[in-house]
Image: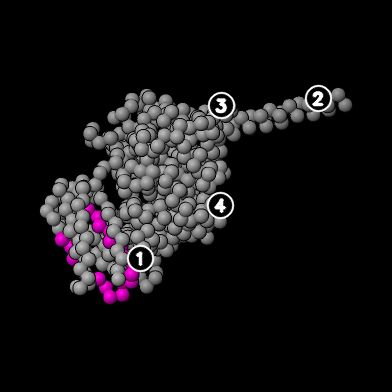
Amino acid sequence: MRGRIALLAVAAALLTTAATASSASAAVSDGMYGVNVQQVFSGSSSSWQPRLAAIQNGGVDLGRIDARWQNVEPNAPSNGTHTYNWGMYDSIAQAMAQHNIRWYPIVDYSTNWSGVIAGDSNSAVAPEHIADFAAYATAFAKRYGRGGTFWQSHPSLPQLPVESYEIWNEENSTVFWRPQDDAPERYADLYMAARAAIRSADSNADVVVGGLALGGYGGGADEIAFMQRMVAHRPDLAGNVDAVGLHPYQADVPDTEMRIARFRQTLDQLLGPQVPIEITEVGWTTTSVSDAQRGADLAQLAEDLPRSDCNISRFLPYTWITEEQNSSDSEHWFGIANSDGTVKPSGQGYLNAVQTMESSVAPSSAVTICHQPVPQTPISALPPSTGPHPPKKGPRLILRVRHIRHHSRLEVRGTCPSGCRLQVDLLKGRARSASLKLATKRTRFSSRRQVIRLRLPRKLGRKAKLVVVATGKSGVSTTRTRGLRIR
């Protein structure tokens, strides 16, 4: 009997030890850590393997990269039938799966045929027909999501279907969404349509609001105002948002955590504390900090945020590798690894933190960041974003619109002292609502006054709007919208 009791005691002790070890090693959930891998897939496919192997060996199991609509459906549907070409993304999905890296896709951007600004070849414009974008999102989920046709046709691969879908990227910036005048409202409609579409293919999918830029850089609304306008436009977002992405680029860790805290408190009020924040981009360039400092900062965030009171569900630094060719372009110097696959000290600092947090020696103490008093500094007084796409101002546009009623036409006069090309769109509908495009005219680049005349259709209705886009030498645009009241 004593022997039996002793054996039971030993067994109980072993079970207790195992449970303790298990709970200690569960400091973070699976899929917490990832990295942006946009440039990993540049160059020949033979260069992908060492880059992906280094990520895999470091314990990171998520790779964030765009799933651009344009690359899959370059041509408009014919008679309502969509034709998709998955070749490019099949190769990327296969390469990541071979290294046990799950794809975290950014389902994003318009096509050359679908943008709300007619004839604009820049895909970073709002899609005119949200239903076509939703159809693409559905097709993407049916191919790469749970039970997708890609995985069915590749049974020998590690089965790592897409589980989370980020919808667009920095939609509150003119760099990635133009025009910005109705961006929060139009994006809210896009997100809800895309979420419904993806969940029709995978009812358990997480659909994430695209990572918001800070402080309205690039001419858009700041991250807080953008979310407020989204929810005001679509109150049904409450209960229907799986997570919200944020890109808190700041000069140092304290400022980064302060901006996260401000956003968390706003999100609590709008959608509730149960909605996670996903840090889908954050990082520093070695043109502004040393590589050693960057590594220490990434490591601190990687260890602090999952243990914090901010409900952070993902952390994906920007970025694994960058071009590193132009010393005057900071965007070339965000990479925490080298193009040959070797890891920089900053990358190793991040990977070490990941491995610590995924081990039995992970710190278990809670970190208070988001629910302590945060100074209510106006957004305009906060430090600017230090993100990878520095804000650039579009050209100064001097605009005059004249309605010549007896000829039923509009005369638009635009001048950019530094030079620009103009595009004028006439749309039917209210100033802040989705609209039907009726006419488009474009000019050549000039610094002189340019005159564009548009004839008004007979059945225009009482309300319409003009969208005038002036694009300067650098490719950055200034957008002006004028509401029209037609009598």
> Which is nearer the N-term, disc 1 or disc 2?
2
Is disc 4 in contact with disc 1, using a CB cutoff of under 8 Å? no
Disc 2 designates what residue? 6
Which quadrant of the figure has residue 118? bottom left
**Disc 4/disc 1 C-alpha distance (Å):** 30 Å
Which numbered mark, 4 or 1, is in the foreground of this view?
1
- Residue type highlighted by circle 2: Ala
| Mark with earlier residue (2, 3) | 2
Residue 36's quadrant in the figure?
top left
Residue hosting label 4: 239
- Mark 3 residue type: Pro
Residue 479's place in the image compared with 380, above or below, is below
Residue 21 is left or right of residue 208, and the answer is right
Residue sitting at x 29%, y 41% = 391
Q: Quadrant of the N terminus?
A: top right
Q: CA distance from mark 3 to mark 1?
A: 56 Å
User: Mark 1 = which residue?
Assistant: 429
Which one is in front, 307 or 27? 307
Q: Residue furthest bottom?
A: 458
Q: Which residues are magenta?
A: 451-470
Residue 271 in the image, given as x and y percentages of width and height: 53, 47
Q: Nearer the viewer, mark 2 or mark 3?
A: 3
What residue is at 48 percent from the left and 35 percent from the top? 261
Contact? badges 1 and 2 (CB < 8 Å)? no
Q: Is disc 3 surrounded by few (<14), some (14 to 19) or many (20+) residues within 10 Å? A: some
What numbered label is drawn on residue 150?
A: none
Q: Position of residue 211 (x, y in %)?
A: 42, 45
Residue 274 at x, y percent in the picture: 57, 44
> What's the CA distance linking mark 2 and mark 4?
53 Å
